[in-house]
Image: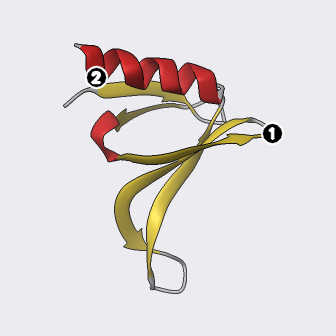
Amino acid sequence: MAWLQLTTDNEESVIIDSEKVLQIKRHAKGSHITLTAILPNKDGKPSLKSLVVSQTLEDVAKALKATIIR
């Protein structure tokens, strides 16, 4: 398991488990990351957790690749 430290679009630092990353998409403010964590949404229905980070898709991919090579 490897942890990634990223910055949200609100300029807050977050640390996520690299093994929980399901999908990364480009976003106007950086990247949109979908995790495998399932949590209730505002309606109480289970949904995948996601977040927007300021790092580009390429930067996140490079960090993930570095955790796999170790």
Q: How many numbered marks have been drawn onto this rendered protein structure?
A: 2
Residue 17 is situated, as x and y percent measured from the top left of the image, at 30, 37
Q: Residue at x 38, y 69 (%)?
A: 39
Label 2 CA crowd tier, 10 Å (few <14, some 14–19, many 20+): few
Residue 38, quarter of the rendered image: bottom left
Residue 30 is situated, as x and y percent measured from the top left of the image, at 70, 32
Which of the two labelled residues, at mark 1 and mark 2, occupies the earlier sequence position?
A: 1
Q: Which residue is mark 2?
A: 68
Give the residue type at disc 2. Answer: Ile
Q: Is residue 25 above or below residue 60?
A: below
The N terminus lies in which quarter of the figure? top left
Q: Residue at x 56, y 48 (%)?
A: 51
Using the numbered discs, state the Cα–Cα distance from disc 1 to disc 2 in whole angstroms. 27 Å
The C terminus lies in which quarter of the figure? top left
Q: Which mark is residue 28?
A: 1
- Which residue occupies the foreground of this view, 57 or 7? 57
Label 1 CA crowd tier, 10 Å (few <14, some 14–19, many 20+): few
Indicate the secondary structure of the residue bearing disc 1.
loop
Left or right of 45: which side holds 70? left
Residue 22 is situated, as x and y percent measured from the top left of the image, at 42, 50
Q: Residue at x 52, y 54 (%)?
A: 50
Q: Residue at x 28, y 23 (%)?
A: 68
Give the residue type at disc 1. Answer: Ala
